[in-house]
Image (spheres, rainbow, N blue to C red):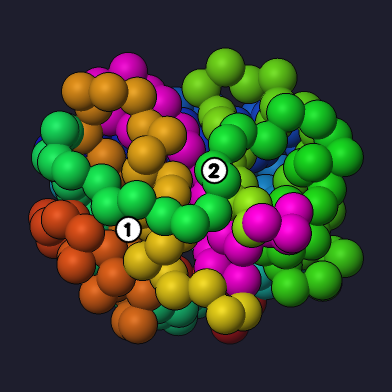
Amino acid sequence: MIMEAVRNNAEWCEAMCRAHGRPGAFGPRAWTNGRRTPLYYPDAVTLTADASVRDVLDTIDRSAPGASVKDSFAGLDLAGEGFELLFGARWIHRTAGLPVPSTDASWRPVRTPEELAAWATAWSGGDADEAALFRAELLADPATAVVAGYGADGRIVGGAVLSDSGTVTGVSNLFAAEGTDPAEAWAGCLALVRDGVPVVGYESGDDLPPALALGFEEIGDLRVWLDTGA
């Protein structure tokens, strides 16, 4: 299942890059982008455990510091190439068909640019630069669903991105607004996953336990490296 999770996440990175007019390319062992990717998105993602340093570094833009590599199998050492370890995380998987708790919020896909802008503002906590990541072009991607939970007053109380790659659905960018239990956000977005499809993603730190409490299992390690220019 880790291979499906890795591929699904790389496809989401590609979707985000396409929305910004900067598509990357899938190779046999890595997805890479020859142009610098949007904020928080990697310039390369390993797709197989045998991907090499050269597979991820030879075709990305390192003309200035800041490029990043998602080492999906935590097997690369990029310290000698001028990178530092940014963070580690755990891939997670949830078996299809597990029950999903109900929530008080009303969850539905975001449909319009105006709804997406409101979602992005809630996701970013009002940071305009971060909110600008989520462009209207994402709404035209058939594999991507931006979903939001709305309280009785119409306020967005949580959200996530669901990426459907056929065999699995990935959850990313999950957030809970202030005063909302993260478990509510997980339950709300899981209720919108296509029936009969396993769910994958990755989390770390305090964001991991709420997912595990709803039936996710840890299936592997990943690491993200940042080019310091050293």
Q: Residues within 10 Å of mark 1 (few under 14, many from 20)?
A: many
Type of the residue with mark 2: Trp
- Left/right placement of residue 56 relative to residue 156 reads left
Query: Which mark is first along the chain, 2 or 1?
Result: 2
Asked whether 228 or 213 is in front, the reply is 213
Q: Where is residue 127 shown, x and y percent of the image? A: 82, 71
Task: Please tell me in which quadrant of the rendered image residue 163 appears.
Answer: top left
Asked whether 194 or 12 is in front, the reply is 194
Q: Read off the magenta span.
A: 152-177
Query: Looking at the picture, does residue 92 appear above or below residue 147?
Result: below
Q: Which mark is residue 107?
A: 2
Element at badge 1?
Answer: strand
Taking the magenta stretch, the answer to whether it contains residue 24 is: no
Residue that appears at 74% across and 73% down: 125
Q: Quadrant of the C terminus?
A: bottom right
Residue 51 seen? no
Type of the residue with mark 1: Tyr
Element at badge 2?
Answer: strand
Q: Are marks 1 and 2 in contact (CB under 8 Å)?
A: no
Task: Please tell me in which quadrant of the rendered image residue 147 appears.
Answer: top right
Q: Where is residue 169 shown, x and y percent of the image? A: 34, 33
> Could you tell me what secondary structure mostly forms the magenta stretch?
strand
- Left/right placement of residue 174 relative to residue 152 reads left
Q: Where is residue 116 shown, x and y percent of the image? A: 77, 42
Taking the magenta stretch, the answer to whether it contains residue 167 is: yes
Residue 7 seen? yes
Q: Where is residue 165 shown, x and y percent of the image? A: 37, 23
Q: Which residue is mark 1?
A: 202
Judged by depth in the image, the label closer to the viewer, 1 or 2, is 2
Task: Please tell me in which quadrant of the rendered image residue 141 appears.
Answer: top right
Residue that appears at 43% across and 49% down: 188
Asked whether 210 or 40 is in front, the reply is 210
